[in-house]
Image (spheres, grey):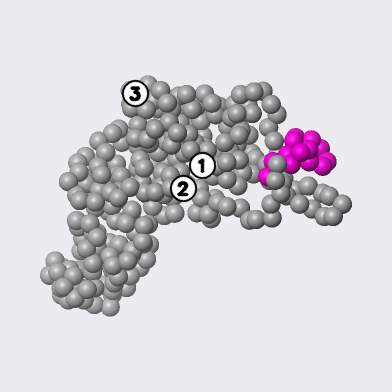
Amino acid sequence: MGVVATKSHSAVRRRLAKLADQQFGVLSRAQLRECGMSDSAIKHAIATDRLFPVLRGVYALGRSNIGERGRLFAATLACGEGAVVSHRSAAALMGLLDRAPASVDVIARGQGGRCIEGIRWHGVRPPRPWELGTFDGVPCTSPSRTLVDVAGEVGTRTLRSCFERAAARKLLDIGAIELTMGSEPRRGMPHLRALLDEWRPAATIAATERLKSPLEAKVLPLLARQGLPAPLCNAPVELATGRIEVDSSGPSSGSSSRPTAVTSMPPTLPSSATAGVTAN
């Protein structure tokens, strides 16, 4: 792998491979040096297609195709220690938005990442400890902080969809959102407060019911607003011909009342969504 500063080639390769495996195949220049590579070794590895530049100061080890998780992790490395994926990039990572933006949204310490192509630097208040976590191994803002940040960048319709998806994935925490909002003036806060008022009566139901899709979450605040009892979602129902599962039924004991649909499909949420966010 070219010139190695002090360690043997095999030891350096092992350290690089182990670290890259933990970081979706990407490494920062600082990490390459810590593993024992000199600047000349790094240059040689790039020239011989053993390292592939991803972002300024970040490289993919052994292959150029690192996938979306690798791209996101690379952005945090490029922006320095403590940087996290945020805003729409974090929302897409958690499944709250369909598409991730072309440039990775990042909140970093100081000016880290501000002038790096492929990164959208956000000069907002740094996340507090409870506003940080990881999702699928990628350092990011918490779901609540992400919703607060996204509120200033999307319209009401899209923000409502984010709430519904968060509820379906058990990521919606009204109290945490309000704590994150505080009293600081930010874009999108009127729309966010209106949605909090809509969802507050239904938040407990969303946290306890077994929801398979945002569509099922959508009806919960509507029912709560009308003072109607919450339905049983995706509950097993015993019939003479056997057990079935209905999308929604009345909250009665025994058999279901007026099931809206019958399904034998498995849950539509990806396994990554059910894993949730791991706090740092």
Is mark 1 in CB contact (under 8 Å) with mark 3?
A: no
Is mark 2 in CB contact (under 8 Å) with mark 1?
A: yes
The three-letter code of the residue at mark 1 reads Arg
Q: Residue at x 24, y 63 (%)?
A: 59
Label 3 vs 2, first from the N-terminus: 2
Give the SS element for disc 2: loop
Label 1 vs 3, first from the N-terminus: 1
Instruction: Find out whether residue 178 is within the magenta segment.
Output: no
Calculate the distance from the C-alpha at mark 1 to the C-alpha at mark 3. Answer: 26 Å
Looking at the image, residue 168 lies above or below residue 183: below
User: Which portion, as a residue range, is magenta?
Assistant: 247-259
Checking the image for residue 184, the label placed there is 3
Give the SS element for disc 3: loop
Magenta-drawn stretch, dominant element (helix, strand or loop): loop
237 and 36: which is toward the camera: 237
Checking the image for residue 231, the label placed there is none
Say which of marks 1 and 3 sits in front.
Answer: 1
Residue placed under numbered mark 1 in the picture: 165
Total marks shown come to 3
Q: Residue at x 60, y 47 (%)?
A: 212
